[in-house]
Amino acid sequence: MNRDELVDILENRLASKPVIDEDGNILISHLPSVGSRAYLHVIFEKANSNEVLKSVKEAGVQLPKSFLELLAQCNGFVLFQGALSIFGVRSQLSRSAGKRQPFDLLEANTIARPSNLNKNEIYIGSYNWDGSILFINQCDSIIRHRSPDSTDVLNEWGDFDQFIRCEVDRLSLLFDEGGAEIDPLVATSPSPSRLLD
């Protein structure tokens, strides 16, 4: 899935048109009731290939081709007010209010790496409801979901395309057209499901 397809999937569910900020990030569905700079979805500008290679080398991980292709299209994203985040490569260490950047893939796989991942698993994202993690094995394109304190896999998706489509469909049912959670007491992380064979 490329960046334009992701924007189309997200945009089709809302009445508002996307905005592109000064850094090339795509912002969808402004939420002024949350804050002047708040958006339901933020898709970060594609990553610089040199920055990706540097970060991967520093983290000592080998990213599967499918994840490298995603970073070449978009440098991670934050969907549904942060309910789902996919990490990217930070180009600056500063966290200035004026600069939107993804959660850092390098930091997530070094100093903030969950202890329940084995050496071949790469921490690529999370759900903010329960802190559950998304990871991908260095050898395949399967996206897996687990609790932050367990080794049990709760969900699997065959690839990024399937993962994004399924999760956008599921999460869209939990938010109204204005971007507010329909019921803030309902978990935004997925319920466990049958795993791939």
Image (cartoon, rainbow, N blue to C red):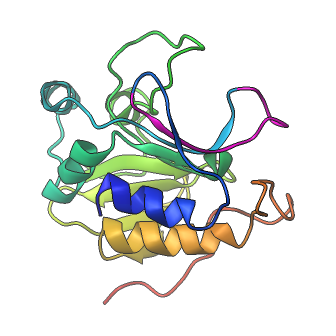
Residue pictured at 13% horizontal, 55% vertical: 65
In the rendered image, the vertical position of residue 95 relative to residue 196, given as above or below: above
Front-most of residues 30 and 111: 30
Front-most of residues 134 and 95: 95
Does residue 120 appear in the picture of this structure? no
Q: Is residue 34 magenta?
A: yes
In the rendered image, the vertical position of residue 94 relative to residue 176, given as above or below: above
Query: What secondary structure characterizes most of the magenta part?
Result: loop
Residue range (magenta): 24-36
Q: Position of residue 150 (x, y in %)?
A: 52, 59
Q: Position of residue 113 (x, y in %)?
A: 40, 37
In the rendered image, the vertical position of residue 172 relative to residue 56, given as above or below: below
Does residue 82 appear in the picture of this structure? yes
Q: Position of residue 100 (x, y in %)?
A: 50, 25
Q: Is residue 82 magenta?
A: no
Q: Quadrant of residue 110?
A: top left
In this picture, residue 138 sits left or right of residue 105 = left
Residue pictured at 26% horizontal, 33% vertical: 47
Q: Position of residue 56 (x, y in %)?
A: 18, 33
In this picture, residue 159 sits left or right of residue 87 = left
Q: Quadrant of residue 8?
A: bottom left
Residue pictured at 45% horizontal, 33% vertical: 102
Residue pictured at 50% horizontal, 18% vertical: 99
In this picture, residue 106 sits left or right of residue 13 = left
The quadrant in which the N terminus is found is bottom left
The quadrant in which the C terminus is found is bottom left
